[in-house]
Amino acid sequence: MSPDILDETTEVWFGPQHVSAHGWAAKLTLVGDYVVECDPNAGYFHRSAEKCLEFRNFRQGSLIMERLCMLEAFLAEYPYIQAVEKIAELEVPERAKVMRTIMMEASRIHSLQFWWGQFSAELGLFAMLLWPWVDREFFLDTFEELSGSRHAVSYSTPGGVRYDFNDKVLRKLDIALERFEDRMPMMRDMLMGSPTFRARTEGIGQYTLKQGLKFGLSGPPIKACGLPMDLRKDAPDPNLAYDMIDWEVPVTESKEHPGESDAYDRMVQRFKEMETSVEIIRKLLPLVPEGPIIDSKARAKANRLPEGEAYGRVEGTRGISTLWLKTTDKAQTPYRAKIRGPCFNSYYSLKHLVPGAKFADFIVVFGSLDPYPGWWDR
Amino acid sequence: MSEGAPISAATFGRQIVNKFPGVECIPKEDGILECIVPADKIRDVVGMIDEEIHDAFPESVFGVDLQEDKYELIYIFWSRTNRTQYHLRVSLEGSNPEVETVCDIFPGMEWHERETHEMFGIGFKGHPDLRLLLLPEELEGKFPLRKSFVTNRARLEEADRTPAKPNATEGGASD
């Protein structure tokens, strides 16, 4: 007589060597095919970014920030810049505001294309891995033309931006956008209409809006529940250009389970996010004014900051990323910098969202939250 | 989830002070309500945020080392309806300061508290899981984000590693 597998639990480590687990690991306790306990482990990428920031001056700090999430580098570095600009009371030229916003949105599209490919691959749909990644290359070309680097762009700097737009950059950005607009709807319909994809994602990792908020989820995982919580609209930054144009925060409201979201809704939401980003870029491109790209006194002013505290926040691709900065008088480096990555909370929430799911669905719950290890390990 | 009418930062600040007289609330610009909360009142104030603000979003909790065994804990909540950030500041003293956990009210704070514990040595009473989160085991109890944590070459000797050789002052010689 064979023993009943439901009589005992099995512990399985998902990662860190698993191909889907790029630098993280979760200990899953299984009964049969069902996960009863999930213990996400962090720390595999920990590089003590907060301590490092205490030893870098205010122009160098953003370089550490962008390395936390290379996929959304333009967005990841921004909370630091915003906090420094608040303490130093820097004025940002109009041209730099618009250019920053355009590049941040381009970075959002590129980051979501990466996630979309990777998520499809995690579900075993490998064709969808490479198609969006090919289109993503065109955005990377734009970044390379603009800053000389595909990922570590170091674009924003306190008081403005480092690199100016030129014809080549604009042409490359236009090619990337056109290619995206041309091919995305076709690929989206192919993926979302696929019965395999629907079967794997519908009803998986479902939570209510209230639960999501309590777990500290933000960005697309919350907007997929129907709440348009978006810092771009709710707390517009005077040094960005989101208030110069008309646009709507996209939300997804499921007909089957209103006020809740599952993996499928979050996928729908992220496609909407990409469309909104394209819309914002298209509307802002004609509005780029002439003028300087950086306040000429910014460099000197950011050298030594007065005593102060500031809280920089940005609506990143994955949710709200923030940086809390404390400076002492005339110091060249921060006294304390605290980074809040959106994925810190989405990775944590696996502890609550995974139990009850099948083992094979674990990666679907994980992937649908779009976590990036750099954001939680820092 | 029912949408309530927005409560302004000043009104909510007054509500907190009326209910908990030890708390001090200062509405600031940029839609920030700063509350200075005594350590024993933090659960009450966080509980009130949870009850009164239906879309309270736990952003962060973190420590600041003010040196000479003084610490500050800052809790940050965001409400979209009220367009207000709630910054709750708690002052702590002593070499092993302790405060009550709020992670049963807002589960999203659990890991933030866990990280603050390993980095600053601030205890959270009633926290279900205070294992190390990001640090390797050899740094347990060393509290790296405290200002007293040494980060220079002296640590190499502590770890039984030879410090890197200084750069040669003159060229040409090799050993």
Image (tube, rainbow, N blue to C red):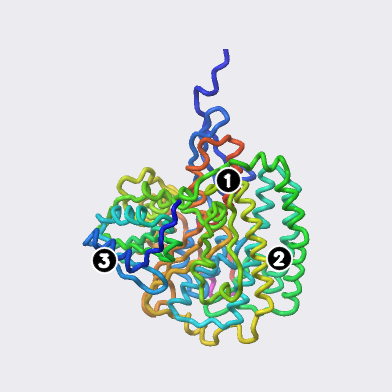
Q: Are marks 3 and 1 on the same chain?
A: no
The disc placed on residue B24 is 3
- Determine whether the residue tagged by mark 3 lies in a helix, strand or loop: strand
Type of residue at label 2?
Phe
Type of residue at label 1?
Asp
The disc placed on residue A14 is none
- CB atoms of marks 2 and 1 within 8 Å: no
Q: Compared with residue A43, is residue A98 higher up or lower down, i.e. above or below?
A: below
Magenta span: B167-171
Q: Position of residue B121 (x, y in %)?
A: 33, 54
Q: Position of residue B27 (x, y in %)?
A: 34, 70
Type of residue at label 3?
Glu
Using the rendered image of the protein, determine whether residue B136 is visible from the camera's viewpoint. Answer: yes
Which residue is located at x 44 percent, y 58 percent?
A: B59
Q: Residue furthest left?
A: B21
Q: Nearer the viewer, residue A248 or A6?
A: A248
Q: Nearer the viewer, residue A165 or B105?
A: B105
- N-terminal-most mark, 2 or 1: 2
Which residue is located at x 31 percent, y 70 percent?
A: B26
Q: Nearer the viewer, mark 2 or mark 1?
A: 1
Q: Which residue is mark 1?
A: A262
Using the rendered image of the protein, determine whether residue B91 is visible from the camera's viewpoint. Answer: no
Q: Compared with residue A234, is residue A168 higher up or lower down, i.e. above or below?
A: below
Q: Which residue is mark 2?
A: A139
Q: Would you call the spot at circle 2 few (<14 residues within 10 Å), some (14-19), or many (20 or more)?
A: many
